[in-house]
Image (tube, grey):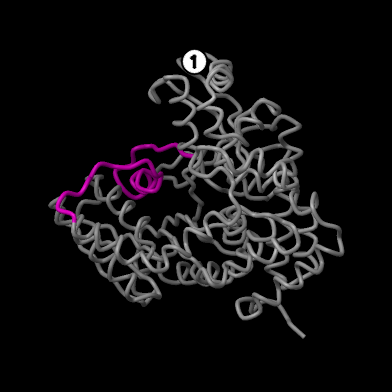
Amino acid sequence: MKKIAFIGAGSFGFTRNLVRDILSYPAFADCTIALMDIDPERLDYSRQAVEKIIKAGAYGANVIATTNRAEVLDGADGVIITILQGGVQVWRHDIEIPKKYGVDINVGDTRGPAGIFRALRTIPVMLDICRDIERYCPNATVLNYTNPMAMLCRAMQGETDVKVTGLCHSVQGTAEMLAGWIGASMDDITYLCAGINHQAWYLDFKWKGKDAYPYIKKAIMSDKNIYNQEQVRNEMFFNLDYYVTESSGHNSEYNPWFRKRQDLIEEYCTSGTGWNPGEYAYILKEYLKREHTWKVDIEEWLEKNDIDLNRGKEYAAGILNAIIGDGTLFKFNGNVRNFGLIDNLPYGCCVEVPVLASKRGFDPIYVGALPRHLAALTGVNAQCEELAVEGAMEGNKKKIFHAICMDPLTSAVLSLNEIREMVDEMFAANKEWLPQFKFD
């Protein structure tokens, strides 16, 4: 009987869907699902959801739920992390302070000034979790879903011995989107995707063994509805020749081209029809709305009679099955350190590359060099992440300032002195959440 621990199990959607996927594998049908969260109310909702899934699938699994992290980690074979350090009233400063200075942010959970300060708050907690994993389940397979993915994974992989990778759904989600645009079945699609989290590139995308990029370009150019779904990403594709992972709104934050002036924001980031065109503070607004409705949404799900037990498209369950289940090989795109995987990105930074999961654990696959123009943009973002992680570990405010100075969007909008003022204000707003830094 395997034990799979969830840290941050109060993330109801993640926990519910990942447990559904895990229990769909025969190797885990009788496992123990161990749920931990610091919020007892949210934790109890997730416990109810897991019990409902177990009953609906007539599984032999059992569930425990506790606020005691050591209890859920003790003897765990797999660990899934889905925490959020600081609630919406804390991280709203990440979005609202830069806006005062002219840096217009859409989501702010990955990089740039907002992503970096989220990392500063979260890295100490992630390292505490890893120390507990080293103590209570040192051989566990650890999967992280918490953002900012690259910086958190870089810190965990660099400072601990935990066997961890980070997972995102943007690679498989975008691949399915592109296949749909050209009328292809995913069974006939193959691709090589590599870069960094939320800015990985489909270095090839093939349909029945043939280059599908001409078909994708034709679909975008001939159908305004397709163009409008992803205006930013489609413009990037037209000009950079390769398609990038993650939504247009996200990607508009990671480069200097789409958010530095109001006219550009209005042209590219407000009228798209995809799930996230690029509206200012999009996710912040969603979270603020849900502060008063989240219980209703959960209770509605718990009251449903029928539950879909079909496996979803997240990677986690397939990875766990490959490593601690029946051993079926599973290939996915994961976040690992760049030890000779992408030749022209910084050595040791966190990259998102194909990884093979097996009884051996994680085996990242060599990619080679990115096209030079892609490496130029991606490399700047990777260097900013490296600086931010170093600054977080050292409690070095200057390195955090330098990381934000070099951020493509911030540097396109602000002067150095303006960036310094903004960073100082962000430090002041986050003072209580940054124990690794000294404040006068």
Task: Based on the picture, tell me whether residue 20 belongs to the magenta stretch.
Answer: no
Q: Nearer the viewer, residue 76 or 437?
A: 437
Residue located beneath label 1 in the image: 209
Tell me if residue 105 comes above or below residue 345 in the rendering: below
Task: Point out residue 136 in the picture as x, y percentages from the top left corner.
Answer: 41, 70
Say if 287 sits above or below 343 in the image.
Answer: below
Note whether 198 is above or below 92 in the view shown. above
Q: Is residue 190 left or right of residue 387?
A: left
Asked if 340 appears above or below 397 in the picture, the reply is above
- Number of numbered discs on residues: 1
Tell me if mark 1 has few (under 14), some (14-19) or many (20+) residues whose alpha carbon lies within 10 angstroms of its own.
Answer: few
Q: What is the quadrant of residue 8 in the picture?
A: bottom left
Question: Which residue type carries mark 1?
Answer: Gly
**Quarter of the figure with the C terminus:** bottom right
Q: Residue 48 appears in which quarter of the rendering?
A: bottom left
Q: Residue at the location (55% across, 29% down)?
A: 192
Q: Residue at x 45, y 57 (%)?
A: 142
Residue 205 on image: x %, y %:
54, 24
Residue at 50% from the left image edge and 55% from the top image edge:
164
Q: Magenta segment, which residues? A: 304-332
Element assignment for label 1: loop
Q: Nearer the viewer, residue 437 or 220?
A: 220
Q: Position of residue 283 (x, y in %)?
A: 52, 56
